[in-house]
Amino acid sequence: MATLEIKDLHVSVNTDEGSKEILKGVDLTINAGETHAIMGPNGSGKSTLSYAIAGHPKYEITSGSVLLDGENVLDMTVDERARAGLFLAMQYPVEVPGVSMSNFLRTAATAVRGEAPKLRHWVKEVKEAMSDLDIDPAFAERSVNEGFSGGEKKRHEILQLGLLKPKIAILDETDSGLDVDALRVVSEGVNRFKQSGDVGVMLITHYTRILKYISPDFVHVFATGRIVESGGPELADQLEAEGYVKYIGKQEAASIG
Amino acid sequence: MAVTTEQQQHGLTAHSHGRAEKTGSAPISSRADHFTSFDVNAFEVPGGREEIWRFTPMKRLANLHNGAEATGKAAVDVKAPEGVVVETVGRDDARLGVAGTPGDRVAAQAWSAFTEATVVTLPGDAKSEPTTITVTGAGEGQVAYGHLHVHAKQFAEAVVVIDHRGSGAYADNVEFVVGDGAHLTVVAIQDWADDAVHVSSHHAKLGRDATFRHTVITLGGNVVRLTPVVTYSGRGGDAELLGLYFADAGQHLEHRTFIDHAESNCRSNVVYKGALQGEDAHTVWIGDVLIRAAAQGTETFELNRNLVLTDGARADSVPNLEIETGEIEGAGHASATGRFDDEQLFYLQARGIPEDQARRLVVRGFFHEILLKIAVPEVRERLEAAIEAELEAVGV
Ligand SMILES: Nc1ncnc2c1ncn2[C@@H]1O[C@H](COP(=O)(O)OP(=O)(O)O)[C@@H](O)[C@H]1O
Ligand SMILES: [Mg+2]
């Protein structure tokens, strides 16, 4: 059973004006089988948390620890973390010109699985996974994320999630910028992943609407670089009604419209 | 994003990028006034400050610019299919020199100094299998001059691969006469040994409705300076000039394309991409396009991108578009030089792909659009392997 333990995590980002502390002591444990919603206003440090766990070079861990099944994740390179079973669906997926989606997916699957998937099975697997997410097969020959719309990028993040089958998935605002249909398709993809095995999910979001499709076991309010309140799904209902005013001293809605 | 992009439409300015962010200067005079002559003595010996020589390391040119005598001969080996005529001719052959006139002293020197030329004639109204011309340098410390003339007759459809390898200093002129309605594809590979110095001018003259696909691949050599010039002698000509270069420590690889639009309704598209790695790796791309007053309905675009993989390397890039008529279809240029994009690397690694493999994917992706267009599969495979080897060499 996989467990991701984040203990007293402090993270700074290197800016032109020097180093700036963004995460100020994050504590969170995610066990396999659990979905944790992290909800917070813009700029509270949610993406910083996800990047720091994934190992983005711009973020410096100043103290604290991140353990995956007791192993120190912070000692691993970015690719080692992914191969150890961490996956980050990015808020802003990166374009890689000239590298086809199919080549990329196969290279990634080969790296994560430790051997090249059998070609015939692989082709079928990718085809089905794309069709489940309503992705046109023509995307396989396009460059990774290049010229994709926001929604197409997010579908492809979830496509990768399904193919790479991590132990712990961090989904950073996968819902943002999606219309209702896309939100449903993407949420179904996440739910299929949840049902596929003993996996944990950290679902980062600003808005409550995705929680109607993906039900969280725990909800955490994230503000000014740390978790300021934790509870069950009822906490999301409270945010839906009241917004983030209680946590940041100014109004910022968690519901749309 | 580490890549900076500059794009200008109908711009008349020049720019330059690199480690030391050199500012490009506007051309001193119009490209239309560029001096050409078959007489080497009509050119002054360049010192290196001249506009067309200012990026070139003159000291490393083995005196090709200063009257170096030929001490040897480059071996020219032509493998041609049925129907293609290959001849070795003397200086007095009337066909030589029709595609263009030397535009710098080294080209004029090569013209004055070659003793025999190779003429390859591609049959008209026919599709030919690829012809491969292998040019092997005269050897380390040797100086050689050469001349190659390729004629694709009316409605010919042909592919010519010119493969340069070996050692020594070599200056030459290469002519491409593309007949009316002909379709000529050229791949020129510069895969020289580490000591080699190669200064070469390509002169392409396109007939009415002719199509010319010219791909330059420059990987090896101490100094390579290649000047492809395209002129049109009728309407409807279409030229595509592609370039791929990969400079390692100490290498100077310079490409100077010039498209001279003097006829109406012609097209040109220039795409050059380079990667650089290692101390004092230096690449230069000068992209001149001139649209003369008569060249109405011209459509042209040129692009240069450079990927700087390590510190200490430097890429200069100077697009220059001159337009003398308002009646054009479209004209533009883009030039960008950037460092390796760490965000791309992070993204690939975050999917479990090890760093070295991720880097190779990105560099291969960068060259992809050029490699994709190389019509000869064996050549494409060889180049892919050569690029892998380049990346392997520095452990990228
Ligand atoms: N690479 C960076 N450079 C400079 N500032 C950053 C960088 N990344 C994040 N920040 C700053 O850190 C804070 C938190 O950002 P982020 O983690 O993106 O928040 P969220 O995802 O909750 O909107 C913001 O003030 C943001 O401006
Ligand atoms: Mg964010």
Image: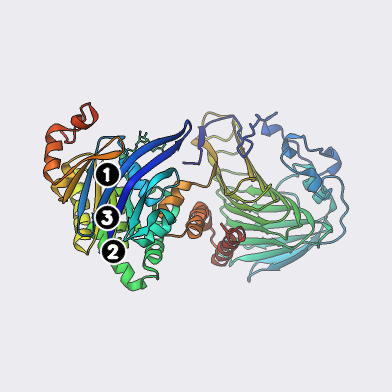
Q: Chain of mark 1?
A: A
- SS for dot 2: helix
Q: Is residue B64 above or below residue A3?
A: above
For residue B257, the mark is none
Residue B259 visible at all = no
Task: Identify the coloring.
Answer: rainbow
Q: Position of residue B170 (x, y in %)?
A: 78, 55
Labels 3 and 2 within one chain: yes
Three-letter amino acid code at the position of disc 3 = Ile
* Residue closest to the eye, B369 or A61: A61
Please name the residue that numbered disc 3 is placed on: A135
Res B374 quadrant in image: bottom right
What residue is drawn where x is 54% and y is 34%?
A: B296
Three-letter amino acid code at the position of disc 2 = Lys
Label 3 vs label 2: CA separation?
Answer: 9 Å
Please name the residue that numbered disc 2 is placed on: A127
Q: Position of residue B162 (x, y in %)?
A: 66, 60
- SS for dot 1: loop
Q: Look at the image and tell me in which quarter the C terminus of chain A lies.
A: top left
Give the crowd class for mark 2: few <14, some 14-19, many >=20 residues within 10 Å.
some
Three-letter amino acid code at the position of disc 1 = Glu
Residue A8 visible at all = yes
For residue A173, the mark is 1
Q: Position of residue B349 (x, y in %)?
A: 43, 55
> Residue furthest toward the top?
A250
Q: Nearer the viewer, mark 1 or mark 3?
A: 1
**Left or right of B151 in this view: B327:** left
Count of numbered badges drawn on the protein: 3
